[in-house]
Image: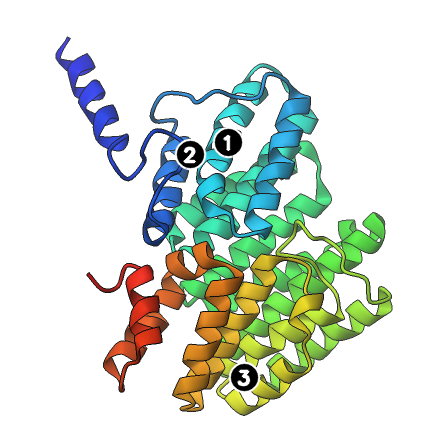
């Protein structure tokens, strides 16, 4: 009896004001915490199971909608849909050894990993990426295995394990299984090479970064310029490689080169709202590093118009806004953005 009361109390705590009634009617500044909390509980098997899709086909439809929510930065909706998808995927996978269900659950965990990385939740990110890898290997899904390797490389890089991040990404890029998967496999290889180049940027090797970025660009050109793999990090094309250059040049210590790369990009041509928002965030960082404060604030406001939930919830963006508040004169626009991001009372 005491154990049941304790569990009931914990469940009530987990369903407190932050989580609301399940409709994700949360303040946008709290959406990151909302998403992380719900994903954590779904991954740990905690809490009451939400209403789940009634069939494998319905689960596929729900995954498509979750991916659309991510691409559109509709994080309030994603905070409901993605944890439910993980719970339902486990329930359906437990009922049989269905390869398709394992593949879909692996993709759900990959989407969760991308969200957790964005929210700077590395511990849960490791868990999600490793589960994705195991499920993809069980299903024999070569592309999902490679994408899980890319996510693990991202997490290793964030942990400061640069040699390990490089090894994971480049080993996966050179894996012979990718050669038999056509254009999609070639695009995954490009994404993996691009990931390795970013690790070199973080390690302070601009020449190595540019060499690998040029290799990724050559792969994208070889594929004909079309955007492939929209569900793998937002796609791969010459345009997305150029987008990658902005952040890579920034971290390699050359914000002027980053700004040059940004000037070649048409934001409208990027494949999703999420990619456009990320580009604007990288450009804002570039202006900040160049000391162009007003341009930085203007770009952050453009990012907010593009994707308000992303701008208000993402820790990296909120950190930049916080820095602007304490390093120079503030404006009505900056203070308003900070307030909407939960940084001012």
Quarter of the image with the N terminus is top left
Numbered label attached to residue 43: 2
Q: Are marks 1 and 2 in contact (CB under 8 Å)?
A: yes
From this view, report whether residue 9 is shown above or below residue 213: above
Q: Which quadrant: the C terminus?
A: bottom left
Judging depth in this view, the residue of 271 and 3 nearest the camera is 271
> SS class of the residue under badge 3?
loop
Name which residue lies at 69% across and 27% down: 99
Taking the spot 83% from the left edge, 55% from the top edge, the residue there is 183
Residue highlighted by disc 1: 86
Q: Tag 1's secondary structure?
A: helix
Which residue, given by chain and number where applicable, does mark 3 sit on?
205
Question: Residue 47: x percent and y percent?
Answer: 34, 24
Task: Give coordinates of residue 316: x percent, y percent.
Answer: 39, 66
Query: Badge 2, how many Cα within 10 Å: few under 14, some, many 20+?
Result: some
Residue at the image position 50 percent from the left and 82 percent from the top: 250
Instruction: Give the camera-side residue of 107 and 312.
Output: 312
- Does the image show residue 203? no
Residues at discs 1 and 3 in contact (Cβ within 8 Å): no
* First in residue order: circle 3 vs circle 2: 2
Residue at coordinates 57% horizontally, 58% vertically from top-left? Answer: 274
Sequence-earlier tag: 1 or 3: 1
Give me the C-alpha separation between circle 1 and circle 2.
7 Å
Q: CA distance from mark 3 to mark 2?
A: 37 Å
């Amino acid at each position: 009896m005491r154990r049941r009361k304790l569990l009931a109390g914990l469940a009530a705590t987990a369903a407190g004001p932050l989580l609301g009634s399940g409709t994700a009617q949360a303040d946008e500044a709290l959406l990151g915490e909302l998403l992380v909390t719900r994903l954590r509980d779904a991954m740990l098997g905690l809490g009451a199971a939400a209403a789940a899709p009634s069939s494998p086909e319905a689960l596929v439809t729900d995954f498509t909608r979750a991916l659309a929510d991510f691409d559109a930065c509709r994080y309030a909706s994603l905070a409901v849909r993605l944890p439910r998808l993980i719970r339902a995927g486990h329930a359906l996978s437990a009922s049989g050894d269905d390869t398709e269900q394992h593949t879909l659950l692996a993709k759900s965990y990959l989407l969760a990993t991308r969200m957790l990385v964005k929210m700077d939740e590395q511990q849960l990110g490791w868990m999600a990426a490793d589960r994705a890898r195991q499920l993809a290997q069980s299903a024999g899904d070569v592309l999902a295995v490679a994408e899980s390797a890319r996510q693990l490389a991202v997490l290793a890089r964030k942990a400061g394990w640069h040699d390990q991040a490089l090894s994971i990404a480049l080993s996966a890029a050179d894996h012979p299984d990718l050669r038999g998967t056509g254009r999609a496999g070639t695009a995954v290889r490009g994404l993996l090479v691009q990931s390795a180049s970013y690790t070199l940027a973080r390690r302070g090797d601009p020449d190595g970064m540019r060499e690998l970025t040029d290799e990724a660009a050559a792969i994208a050109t070889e594929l004909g310029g079309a955007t492939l793999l929209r569900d793998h990090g937002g796609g791969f094309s010459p345009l997305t490689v150029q987008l990658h250059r902005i952040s890579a040049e920034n971290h390699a210590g050359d914000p002027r080169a980053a700004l040059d790369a940004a000037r070649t990009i048409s934001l409208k041509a990027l494949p999703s709202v999420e990619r456009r928002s990320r580009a604007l965030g990288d450009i804002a960082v570039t202006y900040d590093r160049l000391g162009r404060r007003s341009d930085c604030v203007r770009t952050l406001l453009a990012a907010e118009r593009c994707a308000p939930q992303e701008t208000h919830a993402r820790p990296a963006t909120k950190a930049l806004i916080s820095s602007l508040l304490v390093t120079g004169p503030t404006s009505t626009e900056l203070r308003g953005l900070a307030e909407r991001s939960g940084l001012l009372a």
